[in-house]
Image (cartoon, grey):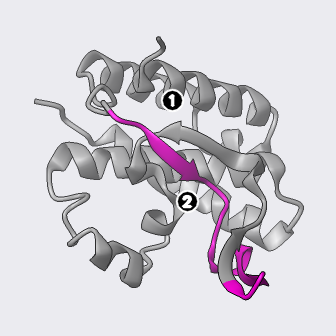
């Protein structure tokens, strides 16, 4: 059985490889990301996920619609091309700070420093996914800025 740490590392490395030729890496050093990832792994940052959940990376409110079938109202979710079984904290709605969803978790998903650091990693992952796969130029530019912000933040992290 593969651990969440192994799975996340493989997913992140695949995105790093896919974006390696992007102009983003002219200002941000990809080696800094890999070095920070090595430190995170050394401190078992991602090793606390014992029960993975279905994480819908690109889902949002516009991807859900209510459908009536046989007189019953059912919620239909569209576009599961970017979904994984992983850390529930990776869900995109937490990175976008959707208050309604976070309130359902009593605001305690990112209380501890280690959890906040994982949130930065997941934000980096999502931003790299946009850089790698989005065709929306403005969205890609915002994602590149987010990558820079996350890498800067990860350079300052001290694990204990």
Rendered view: 72 above or below 85: below
Residue 135 position, x and y percent, is 89, 61
Label 2 residue SS: helix
Q: Which of 112/77 is in front?
A: 77
Residue 111 position, x and y percent, is 16, 58
Left or right: 123 with respect to 100?
Answer: right
Are there few (<14), some (14-19), or many (20+) residues within 10 Å of tag 1?
A: some
Residues rendered magenta in the picture: 51-72
Residue highlighted by disc 1: 8
Q: Is residue 20 inside the magenta stretch?
A: no
Left or right: 79 with respect to 109?
Answer: right
- Say the numbered circle drawn on residue 146: 2
Q: Residue at x 49, y 68 (%)?
A: 93
Are there few (<14), some (14-19), or many (20+) residues within 10 Å of tag 2?
A: some
Q: Is residue 61 inside the magenta stretch?
A: yes
Q: Residue at x 34, y 30 (%)?
A: 46
């Amino acid at each position: 059985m593969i651990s969440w740490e192994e799975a996340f590392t493989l997913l992140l490395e695949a995105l790093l490889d896919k974006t390696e030729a992007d102009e983003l890496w002219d200002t941000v050093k990809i080696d800094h990301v890999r070095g920070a990832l090595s430190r995170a792994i050394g401190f078992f940052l991602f090793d606390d996920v014992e029960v993975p959940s279905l994480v819908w990376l690109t889902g949002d409110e516009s991807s859900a619609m209510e459908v009536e079938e046989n007189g019953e109202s059912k919620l239909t979710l569209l576009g599961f091309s970017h979904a994984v079984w992983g850390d529930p904290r990776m869900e995109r709605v937490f990175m976008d700070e959707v208050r309604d969803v976070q309130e359902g978790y009593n605001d305690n998903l990112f209380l501890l420093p280690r959890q906040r650091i994982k949130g930065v990693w997941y934000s980096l992952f999502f931003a790299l996914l946009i850089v790698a796969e989005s065709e929306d130029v403005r969205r890609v530019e915002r994602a590149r800025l987010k990558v820079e912000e996350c890498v800067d933040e990860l350079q300052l992290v001290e694990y204990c």
